[in-house]
Image: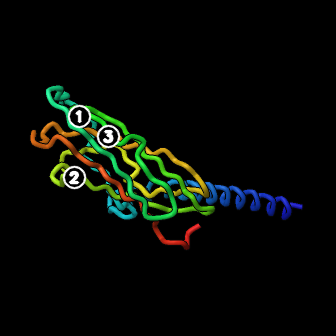
Amino acid sequence: MSGERRGLGLNRVMLRKLLVVAVLMFGFGYALIPLYRKICEVTGVNLLTPRDVTAQAPTNTQVDRSRTVTIEFDGNAQGPWRFRPTVSSMKVHPGEMVQVTYEVVNTQARNVDAQAIPSYAPQQSAAFFKKVECFCFTQQTLGPNQAKQMPVVFYIDPGLPREVSTITLSYTFFEIGGRGNG
């Protein structure tokens, strides 16, 4: 009888130890996700278009209301979708925070992974075009026949040379990985 009690006691001790190990393993697995993201962010792995760390909301910058810059928007699709800006152009004051939306529609009956790459005209304006939020910072996954509205939040640095009165922001949206995904 005492052997059975001792066996039950040992089983309870073993069960407690196993529960502690299981809880520790779960905690370690849960902590890996933010740790992995931070490592990818620091090393630049898995980022095709890095976030512009200098593109924060202007703190001491005043909006320059004495001048207006016309921003033209363009979208080029290289793949199975329709891709376009919701407006073709807008007038902004340097230093003013602005948002524009691009729309993409996956025309396929399969998942598609895609990435947008920006370009600017004139080329010198790229250094003054400060994106705070952009769908181009990460890869996009579109489900079968999915439509998506994707914002770009930006401002034009007031240091933009005065002779530049029009900037064209153009995105090329292309499929990543070819036809094998999904």
According to the picture, the residue beneath numbered tag 3 turns out to be 89
Residue marked by disc 2? 121
Disc 1 to disc 3, C-alpha distance: 23 Å
Residue type at the position of mark 1 = Pro
Query: Residue 27, relative to residue 63: is it above or below?
Result: below
SS for dot 1 = loop
Spatial CA span between label 2 and label 3: 14 Å
Q: Is residue 39 at all visible to an observer of this figure?
A: no
Extreme residue toward the right, this view: 1
Label 1 belongs to which residue?
A: 58
Cα gap from disc 1 to disc 2, whole angstroms: 23 Å
Q: Residue 103: in sight, yes or no?
A: yes
Q: Which of marks 3 and 1 precedes in the sequence?
A: 1
46 or 175, which is in the foreground? 175
Instruction: Estimate how packed mark 2 is, as few (under 14), some (14 to 19) or many (20 or more) residues with alpha carbons within 10 Å.
Output: some
Quadrant where the image shows the N terminus = bottom right
Local SS, label 3: strand
Q: Residues within 10 Å of mark 3 (few under 14, many from 20)?
A: some
Q: Can you tell which quarter of the image residue 156 is in?
A: top left
Residue 151 image offset from top left, x and y in percent:
41, 43
Closer to us: 149 or 16: 149
